[in-house]
Image: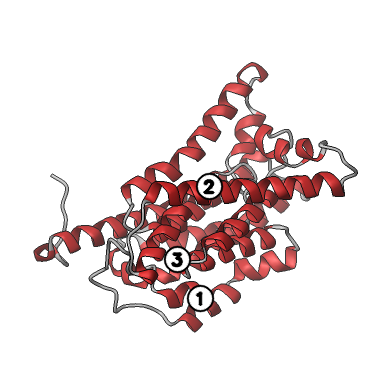
């Protein structure tokens, strides 16, 4: 609710949407997150993703309020728990910088500010690692069992992601190469989106949450729940989306049939891995459509601000 009340989703130091008057109340956005079926399923499943999502939301909330140090502390905690939130660092630094300009109404040099926040993030991360070292009996073996599992993908247990089936079929001689390719693919989004959507850093974080729900090695519905929690802030972009029905129908289709296909494969024995992987592809397709539509709507909104005479006009590819 603090994120929604800030108005950072509709205006920043460099951009103000022409549709900023169209938005949901903070209570409606908070209720949409709390009563989201994916959020409830995450709580019932008792996954640690709940704590990661909580830390990420705290980082964003502190960033929009101008509390940069607390934002870096919360992000380092999220990264300590799940590793992938570290990829949010560039966009979160931009959000902190923009909100500082908006709230304090003063200019500051971006480079020293970014260096200070990155240093704070590194110190907090090192502190969490040292605390884990102490708690585990002064041993660094926990690194292999936590971050090593995510980086090297030794566990190929079926999940809603795209990695497990691909690496089951992979020859061992090519495994290291494609691990690197997959991680480079996941890591390149943060920098590219932060550059292209420099004027909307909060939207970059929202989009990255959706991308992580699709492309990280061990995703779960808690990652999708985080993305769907941030998306209602962009009520003003919904009219610009073109394939909303297709995206929602695809996600609902995969949500309902996913457990059924898993049961047929694992418990009933009347299917195989292709059953479940096919429905995970549908799930990823639905999320990909939503992410792509959000990007299109955000870019169209920026374009209409730059060229007001083109507002609400059809766009056709020539």
**Position of 87 compared to 316: left or right?**
right
Q: From what the image shows, is residue 208 above or below residue 171?
A: below
Q: Position of residue 313 (x, y in %)?
A: 14, 64
Taking the view exactly as shown, the residue that stands out farthest to the right is: 137
Q: Name the residue under label 2.
A: 118
**Position of 312 compared to 44: left or right?**
left
**Position of 81 compared to 112: left or right?**
right
Q: Where is residue 11 in the image (x, y as percent from the top left)?
A: 32, 68
Secondary structure beneath label 1? helix
Q: Residue at x 74, y 63 (%)?
A: 45
Q: Where is residue 260 in the image (x, y as percent from the top left)?
A: 66, 56
Q: Residue at x 49, y 77 (%)?
A: 29
For the C terminus, the quadrant is: top left
**In the depicted view, which residue is nearer to us: 109 or 68?**
109
Q: Mark 3 points at which residue?
A: 231
Mark-to-mark CA distance, 3 and 1: 15 Å
Q: Mark 3 or mark 2, which has the lower sequence index? A: 2
Image marks 3 and 2: residues in contact by CB distance under 8 Å: no
Q: Residue at x 27, y 55 (%)?
A: 299
Q: Mark 2 or mark 1, which has the lower sequence index? A: 1
Q: Residue at x 31, y 62 (%)?
A: 241
Q: From what the image shows, is residue 311 above or below residue 167?
A: below
Q: Mark 1 points at which residue?
A: 2
Residue 164 found in image quarter: top right
Secondary structure beneath label 3? helix
Closer to the camera: disc 2 or disc 1? 2
């Amino acid at each position: 609710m603090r994120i929604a009340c800030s108005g950072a989703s509709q205006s920043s130091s460099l951009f103000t949407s022409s549709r900023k008057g169209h938005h949901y109340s903070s209570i409606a956005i908070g209720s949409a997150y709390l009563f989201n079926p994916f959020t409830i399923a995450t709580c019932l499943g008792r996954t640690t993703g709940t704590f990661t999502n909580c830390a990420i939301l705290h980082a964003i909330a502190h960033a929009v309020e101008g509390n940069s140090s607390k934002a870096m502390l919360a992000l380092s905690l999220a990264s300590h728990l799940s590793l992938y939130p570290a990829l949010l660092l560039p966009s979160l630094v931009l959000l902190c910088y923009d909100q500082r300009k908006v709230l304090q109404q003063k200019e500051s040099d971006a480079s020293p500010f970014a260096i200070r926040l990155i240093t704070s993030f590194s110190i907090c991360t090192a502190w969490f690692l040292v605390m884990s070292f102490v708690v585990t009996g002064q041993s660094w073996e926990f690194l292999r069992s936590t971050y090593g599992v995510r980086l090297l993908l030794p566990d190929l247990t079926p999940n809603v992601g795209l990695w497990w089936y691909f690496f089951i079929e992979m020859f061992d001689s090519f495994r290291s190469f494609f691990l690197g390719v997959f991680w480079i693919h996941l890591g390149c989004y943060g920098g590219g989106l932060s550059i292209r959507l420099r004027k909307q850093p909060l939207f970059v974080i929202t989009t990255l949450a959706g991308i992580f729900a699709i492309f990280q090695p061990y995703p779960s519905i808690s990652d999708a729940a985080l993305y769907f929690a941030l998306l209602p802030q962009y009520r003003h972009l919904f009219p610009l989306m073109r394939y909303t029905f297709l995206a929602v129908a695809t996600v609902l289709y995969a949500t309902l049939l996913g457990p059924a296909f898993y049961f047929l494969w694992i418990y009933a024995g009347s299917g195989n891995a292709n059953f479940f992987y096919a429905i995970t592809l549908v799930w990823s397709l639905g999320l990909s459509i939503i992410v792509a539509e959000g990007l299109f709507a955000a870019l169209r909104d920026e374009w209409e601000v730059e060229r007001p005479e083109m507002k609400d006009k059809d766009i056709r590819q020539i």
